[in-house]
Amino acid sequence: ILNVEQSPQSLHVQEGDSTNFTCSFPSSNFYALHWYRWETAKSPEALFVMTLNGDEKKKGRISATLNTKEGYSYLYIKGSQPEDSATYLCAYDNYGQNFVFGPGTRLSVLP
Amino acid sequence: NAGVMQNPRHLVRRRGQEARLRCSPMKGHSHVYWYRQLPEEGLKFMVYLQKENIIDESGMPKERFSAEFPKEGPSILRIQQVVRGDSAAYFCASSQGSSGANVLTFGAGSRLTVL
């Protein structure tokens, strides 16, 4: 059974703070890792697709890094805003067969 | 440019009835994934289909659950003889291909309540 873990489970930060959270996944036979952002009452939306060890992706104030050898990815948010409040999910591509999602990190940004 | 369409958005069934959830993938997408979100839990993979084929159903319960993605029409997740434990949100996602570089586009979900 594939295990994709995320930490912390939830996080409360003040507006303007920078924050980061972790996704860990099996390091053998890596294929791809996705990050999704899931706002309450909406559908998950793709943030990043990461395929190569050392990948760094950036979209505005959000960025992600990937270490396939040790099996982890970090998501960073710089200068958090209330609209960043959401659950952030990582998904491990299981050999093109399916995507295994982590349990998510629930971020609350307090104004 | 409609995204992934799921219906119904909300479905109420009594124990023992059947539930049918539909998913129309995004235009140009031929790969469909079904996920279940139980209360206070994350997304759990159920089944992955391409047109007329089930590619991976390792997450499907062995009994009462089935899925199809016919040549014409939406993908359907069917739950027979529903029980209270089936109450959950069921999300469908589609992608262009099976490569890990292809992002998933999610529907809004179908929330099933079993009385």
Image (cartoon, rainbow, N blue to C red):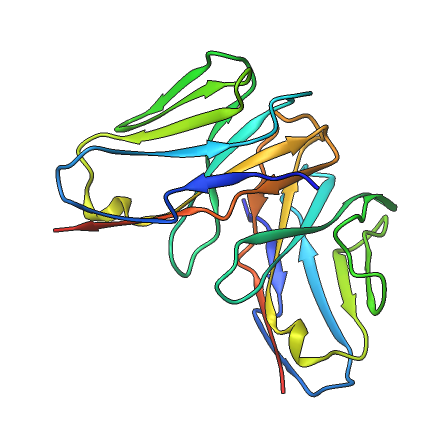
Left or right, B61 with respect to A34, comes to right
Going by the image, does A8 lie left or right of B94? left
Residue A96 found in image quarter: top right
Q: Is residue B90 above or below residue B28?
A: below
Residue drawn at (48%, 52%), measured in percent from left and top?
A43
Comparing B75 with A109, the one in front is: A109
Q: Nearer the viewer, residue A29 or A40?
A: A29
**Residue at the image point whose x is 41% and y is 61% from the top:** A41
- Residue A25 is situated, as x and y percent measured from the top left of the image, at 56, 31
Q: Residue at x 75, y 62 (%)?
A: B77
Above or below B72: residue B9: below
Q: Position of residue B15 (x, y in %)?
A: 72, 86
The answer to whether B89 appears left or right of A16 in the picture is: right
The residue nearer to you, when weighing B71 against B86, is B86
Q: Is residue A64 above or below residue B82?
A: above
Label tally: 0
Residue A64 shown left or right of residue A107 in the figure: right
